[in-house]
Amino acid sequence: MPRGQKSKLRAREKRRQARAETQGLEVAKSTGAAAGKPSSSVFGDRPENLPAAGTTSTPEAPEGATGGATAAGSGTNPSKNINSPKAGSASSPKGTESSLSEILNNKVVLLVQFLLQKYQKKEPIRKADMLKFVIKQYKNHFNEILKRASDHMELAFGVDLKEVDPTRHCYALVNKLDLAYDSALNEDEHMPKTGILMIVLGVIFMRGNCAPEEAIWEVLNMMGVYADRKHFIYGDPKKVLTEDLVQLKYLEYRQVANSEPPRYEFLWGPRAHAEASKMKVLEFLAKVHDTVPTAFPSWYEEALRDEEERAQARAAARAHTAALASARSRAIASTSSQAN
């Protein structure tokens, strides 16, 4: 391979790794903000307004910190000396509870970086590699670190970390709703934008299935996502919501009738109705707020009704298909007997 081409490939790889590291460091801040307590005005005056989430697993950035937040909120580089025995150990009598907690928080950030890099390179995710390159001497805490990193990936990017090969302990990042639009929006190897779609669908659902644009941005602003500011995960958020997802039929964006000056509102698009469900969206939002769907009784009841209607529609579709197949078989049998 020519030297110039090798240099370009190395430069591209460095840019990819830098982007993954930046994303990994910012994920904790983004998901932490998403778990904050929204104001009641965002979701209406329903009696079960969203509760505050626990903050033990998502520390905030220290005041004045730049370049993203670390999971520990310490403002230090999480990859610097994190795997050194001097950093503290679960088995060391000198290690305090607070220092171990900080180390584990940093391990979560490092694992998020590792998962981002594997996803972007389309490489397999193996438990052995996570232990070797990230967890190291903290193997006893592997399940806790993996769970928290997985939660960050789900809330920030809308992807689930699933074990696809229990024998060899191989994992894969799977789009939470298996939405087809991702490939169309991510030609530049960006992470999936399912997370922002799930949040927006949730706000629409909780606002009576039609949400004013300002309510959408009020929630997204709490996550550090602004209409006039490029975001490290979502790119141009306003374009994603009002153009990309609208063109792909996941959102409907329309002017409020007789509004002057013009105001706009969002609704679920036909593909959102087909590929998502109110229960899945409610489960996602409940996890964001560190609670369960039943904590929102009226929304949960509505989601249950939606599930029942979907089940009835599927049953009717299957019955219709079976009836058509039966009629076709009878017609073929009748034709065959007449021919004989």
Image: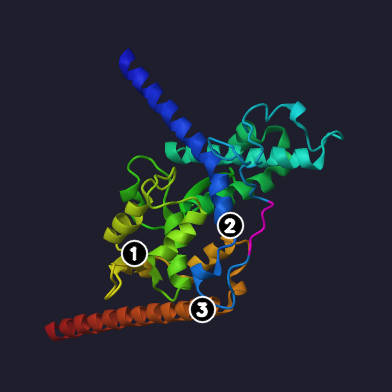
Q: Earlier in the sequence, mark 3 or mark 1?
A: 1
The answer, for residue 33, to whether it is visible in the render is yes
Asked whether the beta carbons under mark 2 and mark 3 sit within 8 Å of each other, the answer is: no
* Overall secondary structure of the magenta section: loop
Identify which residue, 270 or 299, lies in the foreground. Answer: 299
Quarter of the image for the C terminus: give it. bottom left
Q: Residue at x 56, y 63 (%)?
A: 38
Q: Compute the Cα span from label 2 to label 1.
A: 23 Å
Q: Residue at x 59, y 75 (%)?
A: 48
Q: Which mark is residue 251?
A: 1
The quadrant in which residue 205 appears is bottom left
Q: Compute the Cα span from label 3 to label 1.
A: 22 Å
Three-letter code for the amino acid on which mark 3 is drawn: Leu
Q: Is residue 88 magenta?
A: no
Question: What colouring does the structure picture have?
Answer: rainbow
Q: Which residues are magenta?
A: 52-56
Q: Secondary structure at mark 1?
A: strand
Which residue does the numbered mark 2 point to in the structure image?
Answer: 35
Q: Which mark is residue 73?
A: none
Mark 3 Cα-neighbour bin, 10 Å: few <14, some 14–19, many ≥20: some
Three-letter code for the amino acid on which mark 2 is drawn: Ala
Identify which residue, 39 or 142, lies in the foreground. Answer: 39
Furthest residue toward right: 93
**Nearer the camera: disc 2 or disc 3:** 2
Which residue does the numbered mark 3 point to in the structure image?
Answer: 304
Q: Compute the Cα span from label 2 to label 3.
A: 24 Å
Q: Earlier in the sequence, mark 2 or mark 1?
A: 2
